[in-house]
Image (tube, coloured by chain):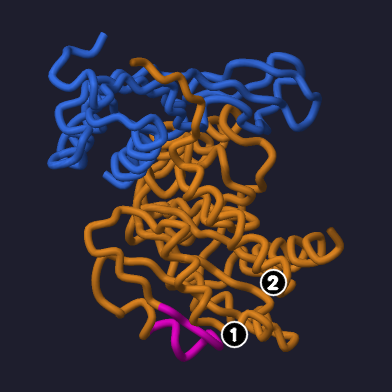
């Protein structure tokens, strides 16, 4: 017998993502999912960002990696709460893992929750974790062709951060190419040139975060 | 692999609701935004289904193209996977409305009375 159904296979996963979002909304916090290749500077960016958020803002990080607690150890001194999620063989964080991570955090004490996804430009883009915004990072050493090569990662981002921007001019990197590719992929998200090392662009990034937080609170 | 496991759960539910004892074929629609390689999914599926009532079931995958709605002017159009330019206003600020789902469309299975018969 043939049974016709119309059933979303990822219903369960999407339902957990929606539940995560609801829980975070209830606590009044803003959740940003950071997506990028490994080594693009997600952890370094958070180390530079969290202390500068200031104003009594309390930040937490859920950090996903296949192995080790190295990122959590780096973030421990700056963030109020940090949870490392080891995905083992998993190439992206799942909404279930985030739900588990949320259970270990005191959400009422958090204003900003950063999810540092597993470094990977493909799979993380396909999974909603319940975040309010996605930030896509592209570091200058990765090359200027990545927006064209991994468009789905950039298409769904609310903000695009060009990290290690102090290396523009040092490396053979054509910013015009990135801008041209983004003009076809995502014109809604601002492109911020950032260097965690020199501090370039930090003000613009912090302003973006504060605006997103304010808009979220108002909504 | 996680998708194959979710799929197996969904198929097992449908089979249980219909008192099936074996599953022969599954039709699945996959949105291109999910970045699934059908061959890879079939491979993962054959592993996930091993030892279950769906072992050996054929997995037919149809890809669903993207459909987007411009957040700026509201035009609905079919973006390419690498270009999201709105034909209405030339901006690229698109909300994906189709091509982001993985839908189970049908399950061909056998009840206890049909045991051993080939599924149609």
Q: Which mark is in front, 2 or 1?
A: 1
- Residue at far front of view: B113
Q: In the rendered image of this protein, which colour is used for chain A?
A: orange
Q: Which quarter of the picture shows residue B11?
A: top left
Point out residue B7 in the picture as x, y percentages from the top left corner: 35, 38
In this picture, residue B55 sits left or right of residue B71 = left
Q: Nearer the viewer, residue B73 or A7?
A: A7
Are discs 2 and 1 less than 8 Å apart at CB? no
In this picture, residue B8 sits left or right of residue A176 = left
Q: Nearer the viewer, residue B108 or A80?
A: B108
A26 relative to B120, above or below: below
- Mark 2 — residue? A29
A203 relative to A128, above or below: below
Neighbours of disc 1 within 10 Å: few (<14), some (14-19), many (20+): few
Q: Is residue A219 magenta?
A: no
Q: In the rendered image of this protein, which colour is used for chain B?
A: blue
- Mark 1 — residue? A106
Label whose residue precedes the other's in the sequence (2 or 1):
2
In this picture, residue A179 sits left or right of residue B48 = right
In this picture, residue A214 sits left or right of residue B85 = right
């Amino acid at each position: 017998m043939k049974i016709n159904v119309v059933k979303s296979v990822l219903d369960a996963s999407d339902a957990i993502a929606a539940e995560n979002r609801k829980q975070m909304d209830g606590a009044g916090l803003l959740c940003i999912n950071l997506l990028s290749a490994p080594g693009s500077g997600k952890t370094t960016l958070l180390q530079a960002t969290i202390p500068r958020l200031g104003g009594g803002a309390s930040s937490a990080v859920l950090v996903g990696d296949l192995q080790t607690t190295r990122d959590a150890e780096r973030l421990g001194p700056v963030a109020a709460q940090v949870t490392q999620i080891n995905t083992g063989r998993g190439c992206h964080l799942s909404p279930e893992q985030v739900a588990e991570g949320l259970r270990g955090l005191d959400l009422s004490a958090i204003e900003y929750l950063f999810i540092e996804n597993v470094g990977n430009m493909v799979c993380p883009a396909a999974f909603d974790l319940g975040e309010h915004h996605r930030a896509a990072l592209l570091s200058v050493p990765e090359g200027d062709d990545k927006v064209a090569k991994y468009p789905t990662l950039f298409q769904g981002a609310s903000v695009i951060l060009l990290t290690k921007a102090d290396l523009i001019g040092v490396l053979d990197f054509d910013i015009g190419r990135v801008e041209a590719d983004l003009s076809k992929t995502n014109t809604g998200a601002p492109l911020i040139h950032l260097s965690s090392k020199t501090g370039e662009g930090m003000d613009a990034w912090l302003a973006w975060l504060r605006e997103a937080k304010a808009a979220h609170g108002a909504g | 692999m996680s998708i194959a496991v979710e799929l197996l759960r969904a198929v097992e539910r449908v089979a249980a609701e219909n008192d099936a004892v074996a599953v022969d074929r599954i039709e699945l629609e996959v949105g291109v935004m999910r970045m699934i390689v059908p061959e890879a999914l079939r491979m993962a599926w054959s592993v996930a289904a091993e030892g279950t009532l769906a072992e050996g079931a054929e997995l037919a995958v149809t890809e669903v193209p993207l459909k987007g709605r411009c957040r700026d002017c509201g035009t609905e159009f079919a973006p390419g996977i690498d270009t999201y330019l709105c034909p209405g206003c030339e901006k690229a600020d698109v909300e994906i409305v189709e091509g982001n789902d993985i839908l189970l469309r049908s399950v061909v299975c056998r009840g206890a009375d049909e045991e051993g018969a080939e599924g149609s």
